[in-house]
Image (cartoon, coloured by chain):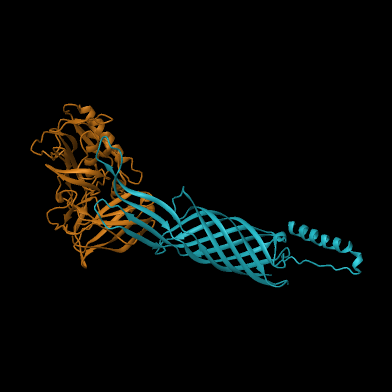
Chain colours: A orange, B cyan
Amino acid sequence: MRRAAGILVAVAVLVSALPVLGYLKLGSRASTGTVNLKWDDFPIRYFVTNRGVPGVTAQQLQAAVVRAFNTWNGVDTAQTSSQFAGFTQAPPFDDDDMTVLGFLDRPELDRVLGATTFLIDVRTGEIVESDIFFNATFPWSTSSAGQAGSFDLESIALHEIGHLHGLGHSALGETEMRTGGRRVLGAEAVMFPIAFAAGNVADRTLKADDLAGISDIYPTAAFQRDTGSISGRVTKNGTGVLGAHVVAFNPRTGKLVGGFTLSPDGSFVIAGLDPGPHVLRAEPLDDGDLESFFDATFSVDLNFSAKFHDKLAIVPRGGGTRDIEIKVSPK
Amino acid sequence: MIGRHAWRLAASVVLSLAVASPAAGQVLIRKRVREVPRTGAWEVSAGAVWLAGFDLEDRTAALTRNSTTDTSPFEQFTTTSRLAAATGVQGRLAYYVTRSVAIEAGARYAKPTLAVRITGDAEQAADVTAEEKVSHYVFDGSVVVHLPQLSFASGRAVPFFALGAGYVRELHEGDELVETGTEYHGGAGLKVLSAPGARRSGLRVDVGISSREGGLDLPDRRSTQTFAAVSLLYLF
């Protein structure tokens, strides 16, 4: 889900789910452990609520949603597809066996631009239904160049449809605290939980982190063959750090892909990386609200300073490099 | 055939001078020996090679800036990459198609350090140089042209120049990732042979420059690398 407050805009996922593995994937606890949230049947058939808001008609909403779905479907290393099934009078967030995207009036969510809910098979993690609402309280635009003072519907739809596919939030961004909340300085993932300012359309384009995430959930054979992973631990004084944000940077291509340490021993996995040497950087998860990334059971350690690993991590083609340890120090 | 013509020319000059000096009462023919191998000879050499370092890509970890007016990226940190200079070994096998022209195959191995300097972190993470050792191989072929007319030290020191191309194979640390490329090289050097004879040993010194593409570098980027080598050779 994405939220806004004053000049701030953020997004949050209204789903009782857990991040799974390295980065973006959503998961749910099952009796057998944690299962990934993902669609098993394609194309994803979705409806659009036949309702507009000032500045955006229902048809413009539908067109923006189609473009956003097509952007995800166009990732050539992932296998997804979708189909617009028609307009509906049904609002999003109903358990009606229909995946519905549309506007809702939610003035009480004064920092939430949009959100995604799921109906899942708790045994397998299969997504049965997913709804997305866009908060009609905010000003919206579908202008191709963006419109000052209005949030870009296609950008927010792209983010929420990322959740709809099973992606969680990315932490690839820098923020600063201002009166009223957090403001994004820069981000390199559509799945960053805080949206760009009104009028900005930069989040219509998926970034390397988004591509790695969607491809990791729905991989093509070429993706599995041609990319690799890095796994290891983040430790502080010899013990694991939970909830650290780990970024892999390719110094040849400039691509950034992030992940998290998701177990008490500080272990992490970052997948979907191009073969070659990577720079690793670990930092505390202090550029967003923790609940945007983890549920309340996670005791995230924020008491350490950002640090680069002093060795290059070599990503093999179709495999993984393991046993990397990034040793961080308390602040 | 260039070498053979040069030898004949030199010999005829010496003879002409001798014939033109009958007043001395005797003819002194100084036969200048040129240490040019015979056609069909083989030469094998092995020795040490020094490879200069060169710069690779510099990159900025760039975030998309949250601005509708400022399109410059938000820089999180910057990397400067360099393949450091290294010493290694090389071996070459040459076949003389004429007395001055040889075709040659060679192999080279070195283990340079790939160093990535990381600076300017937006959250003040300390600057670091992250490194790895790379196994660097080149398998190449060259045409070597000897210049006996420029020889010295009683003809035993023979300059040469060489041109060729090669296949670059570089293994990252852990040997789980191979990156390949091509290179073109040119260079010059000197061979100093021992006393005349069908089988001779000697010393070979090369310097040159290689223009390479691929390997550790981006596929569409070409880098240049100078090299120098000292080898022992055996001619047979």
> Which image quadrant is residue A143 in?
top left
The number of numbered badges drawn on the structure is 0
Residue A314 percent location from the top left of the image: 37, 59
* Name of the residue lying farthest toward the front: B23
Question: In the depicted view, which residue is nearer to us: A47 or B139?
Answer: B139
**Measuring 54% from the left and 55% from the top, which residue is drawn there?**
B210
Q: In this rendering, would B146 be left or right of B111?
A: right
Residue A128 percent location from the top left of the image: 20, 44
Asked whether residue A135 appears in the rendered view, the answer is: yes
Residue A182 percent location from the top left of the image: 16, 44
The quarter of the image holding the C terminus of chain A is: bottom left
Question: In the depicted view, which residue is nearer to us: B48 or B44?
Answer: B48
Residue A196 percent location from the top left of the image: 22, 39
Q: In this rendering, would A292 be left or right of B109?
A: left
Work out whether A153 lies above or below B113.
above
Asked whether residue A114 appears in the rendered view, the answer is: no
Work out whether A158 lies above or below B90.
above
The quarter of the image holding the N terminus of chain A is: top left
